[in-house]
Image (cartoon, rainbow, N blue to C red):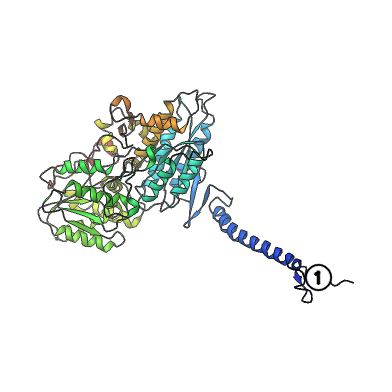
Amino acid sequence: MTEPRYHYWIIPRPGRFPRLWSDWLRPATVLLVTVLLVTGVTTAVPWLAGRLLCRDNLPSGDIYSSDDECVGITDGSYAFGLPAGFEQVLGRIAEQNKDAENLPCGEDRMPVKIGVLTTLTHPNSGARALHQLEGFAAGQARANQPGCSRPLVLWVGHTGKAEQEAEELARRFREDPSIVAVVGFPLSSINAAKAVNALGAPVNENNQNEAHPVPMVAATITAEGFDRDGTRYATGCDEETLFDQGIGHGYFFRVAYRIGSQVEELANYLGPDNRPTMIVTPIETSDPYTCITLNLLRARYQHERPELPEVAFNADDESTVREMAKRVCREQGDVTVFYIARSRDLGRLLAYLAERYDAGFCTATITVVSTSDAARLRVPDSDPNLNNPRNDALQSSAFSDGRLRLVYTPLADPDVLRGEAGKGSEFAELETLFGEAGVDLSHLDDGWAINAYDAVYTVVNAIDGLNVNKPVTRALVRGEIAGFSATGEQTQLAGANGRIGFDNNGNRAGIPVTVRLCPLDRKNPNQTHTVTQIGPPGDRTPCPTPPTFALR
């Protein structure tokens, strides 16, 4: 009997090798297959685990885990494991998507699909993330009312708590030819800019399968440089904030008033004889919203002598906010603080100032002026560590009697829109839609829902302007949006926040209002209101009683 060539089928017998190279073929093949299997399992297990954990134990290529949270694209039937409020609004979107298949908009009018790119968990959003999503849902409900031109379907992309997946989800929307536009983009961040560029990049003519650039309408992005023109105010900021070539390649529009318009309006409020006493700014230079705004403000007051003092603090160290309050309280007379940091620290600053008033260390009349992010203080914060100082500040004696005031330029303000400014707008329709959906009307207060509604409304009106007998294409939608021009009312939309028209760089035309935030309503501890009758810096007139329509 011939002796076997191998032990255990794969190991050559010592007496044979290395007689033939073929003796090693079998073990080499087994080794290679083993390496490939181990590599495949090592790669596949995390991939599969990330999808099993994030889709109710069913694998999904659209939903996955990133930085220990569930992200991806949903039709509304998946709520990323978030609280009940998100489940409710995403469930409503899922129902509206399903209903869109059977709407009587015309037998040959297939539903059109737009993407929503947003972060539902970023700490800079707070409770406003939910409100924005509710605004998108209301915009879809408005589009799908009887008489609709084409039914609307929404697909929601959650980019993560640091917007870490913004560019990836933008690429997925770009490669899906059924997506005719994208709305959202809640924060003026580097990752948001990368997502905009991914959606609006020119077509690669060498790749016929690459989708056409996607028209975009941002709801709440305000920072300078987030447009077709780019920014000239990024000196000293991190290199990634240098959008000197612009973003979006002409496909990016925004319904929020840019920071340049807001700063100019606040400067007009202060007037030529009331320059800011100081500028409050974070030490970080990586956030384009704050860093570029600082440079813009410097340019606005560059001829002031002496130069405006800048008081910097560390957003990661709460104790520096307390020290900043001490610095402000050392001033005498009428003090104007231009606050250009993120609003998550604004409540703390106001609370510390109120403390110092109570302790007798503050004697000045302090007016804090800020840009649109300050509207975060209008609503209860989802983070108790931020909501408690907010409540302390807004119910303090100094804030109530006018010694301490907050003046800002909101994205949109319901108390303004319930007055003369809202006549002829979509705001009343938006309130009706919120009521029908059972959504608390106070969720309109910070303006994010209003602007989200207007972003969807802009795209829907662009689609409605197309020939109903022809396919809806991205290029046609982009052309219609660009036609909502800044040059005259006849070319503008009547959105929930007034007339909407865009300049050549995709920025919203017009100027924002300036409002004063009033103390918490004693009858409703979570409710506050704003007024446009502000008074100059130094005015200690208390806020008037809220009008009837502001009491809900």
**Which corner quadrant of the image does residue 226 belong to?**
top left
Q: Which residue is mark 1?
A: 5
Please state the horizontal and vertical placement of residue 252, each as a whole percent of the image: 38, 39
Q: Residue at x 18, y 61 (%)?
A: 326
Residue placed most toward the observer, 396 or 508:
508
Image height check: is 274 above or below 283? above
Can residue 12 be seen? yes
Taking the image as shown, residue 24 lies to the left or right of residue 302, namely right
Q: Amino acid at mark 1?
A: Arg
The percent position of residue 347, horizontal first and vertical second, equals 27, 53
Residue closer to the observer: 315 or 465: 465
Horizontal arrangement in the rendering, residue 203 relative to residue 35 (left or right): left
Say what secondary structure mark 1 lies in: loop
Measured from the top left, where is residue 262 in percent x and y? 24, 42
- Quadrant location of the N terminus? bottom right
> Which quadrant: the C terminus?
top left
